[in-house]
Image: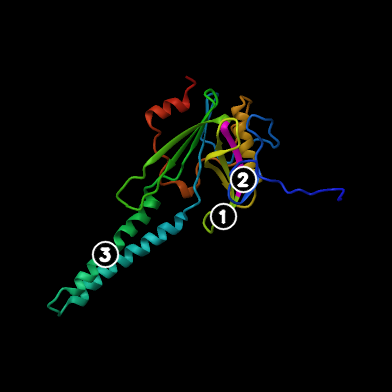
Amino acid sequence: MPLFTMDEPQPRLNPPIKNWREDMPENQEPQLVPPKLRWLTTLNDTFLEVPRYSTEVVWGGMLICGIFISIFTFGIGILGFVLQMGHDDYVMIFLGMTAVCAFSPLALFTLKMYFVQPRDQPIRLNRKRQKIYIFEYKRTFFPWLKWPTTIRSYDWADVRGEIRYSSDRYNMGFQLFGSVCEPGTNKVVTRFLIAKERSSQEMLCQIWSYLSVYMQHDSVTADPIETGRPDDWCPRKADRWPEDMERESTTAT
């Protein structure tokens, strides 16, 4: 019989998140690392707002792709008219216009993604109500439609923290998720993303610590690592919260 056993850590929640790496301490318990945020929007005695900057889209690539597709679409339309010269039918014009109709929505979609669509999907924590609010967009392919927004709220006591590692090409790195469980259990109902880090999960542990300490009514400092917004996110801030949710998430009663 071995004198020592080296049991690997196992996820506490059921079902565990894919590519699980670490469970965070319970949010009502003392935290093990110093609290720290990378970004901060609002901090006061009632609520805290933290921006979430998505890395699922390569925004510079969207711009380059949109310009390339626009030039290609315009060129193929002109080419159809040029090749039609000297012919009595309209086959080439028809083919050219068909290509324009096929590629124009894709060009509009990529350009809209870069210049028009907001990129910040914030979360708010109201420590008076002990609730967390998640602001999210649902992307649509159709370039003429506005992205619909979804606001979800959960009791903070039901939220657990999990870190996973994603190997996706455009979403690679460590990710901190809030996992909402049935009250008093470790059975997960749903999950939402809190933050991402490319190379280290230490910052994610500090972020979870910050949120937990704040919701425990302890003092935290308003000195995030980064200030302002990254240049990549300049085209649009997040849309306004719905009036009823704005009132609920920012007030005590």
Marks 1 and 3, the one that precedes in the sequence = 3
Task: Measuring from the top left, give residue 41's x and y in whole percent.
Answer: 51, 35
Q: At x 53% / y 59%, what residue is drawn?
A: 169
* Principal secondary structure, stretch drawn in magenta: strand
Range of residues picked out in magenta: 158-164
- The number of callouts visible is 3
The answer to whether residue 146 is visible is yes
User: How far from the left and from the top, in percent, is residue 242?
Assistant: 38, 32
In the picture provided, is 135 more to the left or to the right than 92? right
Give amino acid for label 1.
Answer: Met
The CA distance from mark 3 to mark 2 is 45 Å
Against 158, is 83 above or below? Answer: below
Q: Residues within 10 Å of mark 3 (few under 14, many from 20)?
A: some
- Residue type at mark 2 is Ile
Which SS class for mark 2?
Answer: strand
Q: Farthest bottom residue? A: 86
- Pick the residue in front: 65 or 193: 193
Looking at marks 1 and 2 on the same chain, the residue that comes earlier in the sequence is marked by 2
Label at residue 163: 2
Determine which of the numbered discs, if any, sits on residue 100 in the image.
Answer: 3
201 within the magenta span: no
- Could you say whether the residue bearing mark 3 is in a helix, strand or loop? helix
Residue at the spot 40% in from the left edge and 61% down from the top edge:
65
Q: Position of residue 196 (x, y in %)?
A: 57, 47
Amino acid type at circle 3 is Val
> Mark number for residue 186?
none
In the image, residue 75 sits, relative to residue 114, either above or below, namely: below
Q: Of the residues under marks 3 and 2, which one precedes in the sequence?
A: 3
Q: Are marks 1 and 2 in contact (CB under 8 Å)?
A: no
Specify the quadrant of the image occupied by residue 194.
Answer: top right
Residue 160 counted in the magenta span: yes
